[in-house]
């Protein structure tokens, strides 16, 4: 390992009241366990960061069936403009926390924004099996998401609004076309 890494590990071991040998063994055992479970330590750290960001933004993990039911009921019972405003406000909040702009500024390249949105969808919508976000000549950005067949239409419409508001909060105006649901 590099001298810099060794020094940082040694400082960390001292702070934790461990020897460098025991800290390196602990890290090694965690790497082996992560590999056994099918992911890397880098992925574990990324997942921890994601969970911390989700907690700070007041997100919850909920049962999929319960969420679909609740969102469908909200959309059916609330006035359309109120539901749309709630979705839009949530999207602006999500975009400011989870959708990365280039270099820490609000300006970003389209490519950076596209990759960031793809990561956001992959991280938060586990029931999404396909994510395609591409710039099509003459069409602009095209977003294609394939979700599980159980997803209610109301929830799909909410995701359209969420996506639209997320892009718009980063200065990208997208004319969203709804396409038919394909299963």
Image (cartoon, helix red, strand yellow):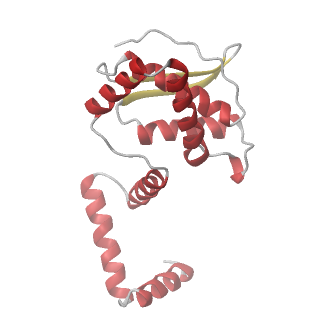
> Viewed as shown, does residue 119 lie left or right of 151?
right
In this view, the residue in front, 16 or 92, is 92
> Viewed as shown, does residue 64 lie left or right of 128?
left
Task: Check the image and report above or below for 119 versus 74.
Answer: below
Task: Check the image and report above or below for 177 versus 81.
Answer: above
In this view, the residue in front, 61 or 14, is 61
> Viewed as shown, does residue 79 lie left or right of 153?
right
Number of marks: 0
The x and y percentages for residue 128 are 39, 29
Rendered residue at 55%/21% (across/down) = 81
The x and y percentages for residue 38 are 29, 51
Rendered residue at 67%/14% (across/down) = 139
Rendered residue at 73%/50% (across/down) = 105
Task: Check the image and report above or below for 125 versus 40.
Answer: above
In this view, the residue in front, 108 or 153, is 153
Rendered residue at 39%/25% (across/down) = 74
User: Which image quarter: residue 4?
Assistant: bottom right
The x and y percentages for residue 183 are 34, 13
> Viewed as shown, does residue 36 lie left or right of 23?
left
Q: Residue furthest top?
A: 180
The x and y percentages for residue 10 are 46, 87
Task: Check the image and report above or below for 167 versus 105.
Answer: above
């Amino acid at each position: 390992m590099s001298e810099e890494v060794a020094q940082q590990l040694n400082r960390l071991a001292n702070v934790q009241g461990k020897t460098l040998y025991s800290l390196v063994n602990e890290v090694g055992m965690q790497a082996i366990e992560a590999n056994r479970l099918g992911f890397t330590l880098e992925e574990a750290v990324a997942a921890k960061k994601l969970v911390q960001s989700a907690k700070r933004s007041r997100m919850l993990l909920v049962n999929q069936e319960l969420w679909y039911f609740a969102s469908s009921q909200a959309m059916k019972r609330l006035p359309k403009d109120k539901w749309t405003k709630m979705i839009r406000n949530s999207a602006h909040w999500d975009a400011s926390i989870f959708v990365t702009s280039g270099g820490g500024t609000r300006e970003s390249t389209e490519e950076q924004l596209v990759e960031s949105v793809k990561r956001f969808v992959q991280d938060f919508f586990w029931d999404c099996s396909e994510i395609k976000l591409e710039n099509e000549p003459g069409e602009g950005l095209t977003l294609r998401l394939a979700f599980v067949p159980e997803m209610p239409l109301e929830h799909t419409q909410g995701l359209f609004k969420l996506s639209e508001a997320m892009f718009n909060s980063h200065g990208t105006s997208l004319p969203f076309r709804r396409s038919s649901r394909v299963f």
